[in-house]
Image (cartoon, grey):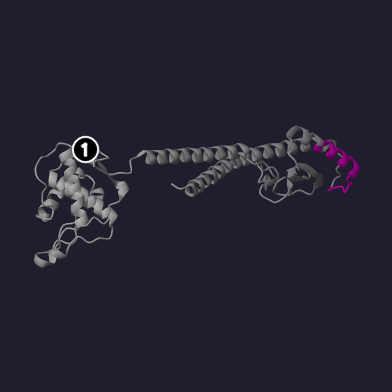
């Protein structure tokens, strides 16, 4: 995973967690605000209903005028108590007055306009026998009390930072493990006359002639990556020299006292013996085997002679020859 993809995923985690926690916080805030505001308005309504008899509000039936100074003083005192007791900004009683009777008098819960952009005047009518007591209240919007969820922000930031650190550490460990892995896939050990799968450490014996030819073939193809080794042509001189050198080394190591074989003879049999051992060495890994596997001739007769047995994908770092 690249650093860019890690950062993009961390950003997605942060945004997702922050939005979820903010929505949960705001929803709880809305419910609490609505409950508190509804309770405060009901308390105000009850207080005003009890105090109305002692206020000089006038009488619409007798056309008695309203004592504005007295009412304003009462509203100022009432709003101060509301602010101290409930602590809800912008909640205030704007006016109180009597009006002629109305069929619909408000009772129970209020339908509060919580989602306006600013405070909204709300009219409440209280039935009082001979007239309606009408009270205008300024109701604040939830947005005037909206709060940023700092805990949710820090929580989302912490989780996303932990995700980045954890994945960066995993990537470092992966790279360390990768660097510790041997680059070679195959060891050709002349000391034991074996081919060794570096990954599994499995070893398989190989006869002298195919072993020496294979050593020379690998070296030749590394030095000549675009070479074509055709069945109907003689084996290149440099490849023969490499095979003879490997055979001389086997003699020095005490593996044989026989005379040097003709590496130009019975080529297909030699290649078949090499393939047979490679089938065992890389039995569970066709991809690695293909690097060292001399391609088989396809077709029959003269067409098969045009086939190259060169190893076009072999590289120096993929193979190590031990004891040469």
Q: Nearer the viewer, residue 212 or 117?
A: 212
Helix, strand or loop at label 1? It is loop
**Image position of 161 with respect to 299: above or below:** above
Residue 76 in the image: state x and y as whole percent. Answer: 84, 39
User: Magenta: predominant secondary structure element?
Assistant: helix
Residue located at (68% from left, 46% from top): 143
Quadrant in which the C terminus appears: top left
Residue 252 in the image: state x and y as whole percent. Answer: 17, 38
Residue located at (58% from left, 38% from top): 152
Residue 220 in the image: state x and y as whole percent. Answer: 24, 54
In the image: residue 176, left or right of residue 216: right
Residue that mark 1 sits on: 202
User: Does the magenta-highlighted stretch encompass residue 78?
Assistant: yes
What residue span does the magenta drawing correspond to?
Answer: 60-79
Q: Nearer the viewer, residue 100 or 45?
A: 45
Q: Residues within 10 Å of mark 1 (few under 14, many from 20)?
A: few
Residue located at (83% from left, 40% from top): 75
Q: Nearer the viewer, residue 174 or 301?
A: 301
């Amino acid at each position: 995973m690249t650093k860019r993809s890690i950062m993009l995923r961390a950003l997605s985690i942060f945004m997702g967690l922050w939005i979820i926690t903010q929505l949960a916080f705001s929803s709880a805030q809305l419910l609490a605000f609505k409950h508190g505001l509804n309770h405060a308005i009901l308390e105000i309504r009850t207080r005003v209903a009890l105090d109305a008899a002692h206020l000089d509000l006038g009488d619409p039936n007798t056309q008695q005028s309203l004592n504005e100074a007295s009412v304003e003083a009462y509203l100022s005192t009432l709003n101060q108590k509301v602010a101290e007791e409930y602590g809800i900004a912008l909640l205030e009683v704007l006016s109180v007055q009597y009006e002629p009777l109305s069929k619909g008098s408000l009772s129970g819960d209020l339908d509060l306009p919580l989602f306006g952009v600013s405070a909204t005047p709300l009219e409440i009518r209280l039935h009082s026998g001979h007239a309606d007591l009408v009270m205008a209240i300024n109701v604040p919007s939830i947005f005037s009390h909206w709060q940023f969820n700092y805990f949710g922000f820090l929580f989302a930031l912490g989780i996303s930072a932990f995700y980045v650190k954890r994945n960066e550490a995993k990537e470092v460990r992966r790279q360390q493990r990768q660097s510790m892995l041997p680059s070679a896939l195959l060891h050709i050990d002349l000391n034991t006359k074996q081919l060794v799968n570096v990954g599994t450490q499995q070893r398989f014996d190989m006869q002298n002639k195919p072993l020496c030819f294979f050593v020379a073939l690998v070296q030749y193809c590394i030095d000549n990556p675009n070479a074509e080794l055709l069945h109907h042509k003689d084996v290149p001189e440099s490849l023969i020299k490499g095979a003879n050198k490997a055979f001389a080394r086997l003699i020095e190591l005490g593996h044989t006292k026989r005379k040097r074989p003709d590496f130009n003879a019975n080529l297909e049999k030699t290649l078949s013996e090499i393939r047979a051992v490679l089938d065992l060495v890389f039995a569970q890994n066709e991809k690695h085997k293909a690097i060292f596997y001399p391609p088989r001739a396809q077709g029959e007769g003269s067409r098969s002679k045009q086939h190259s047995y060169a190893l076009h994908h072999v590289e120096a770092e993929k193979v190590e020859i031990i004891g040469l």
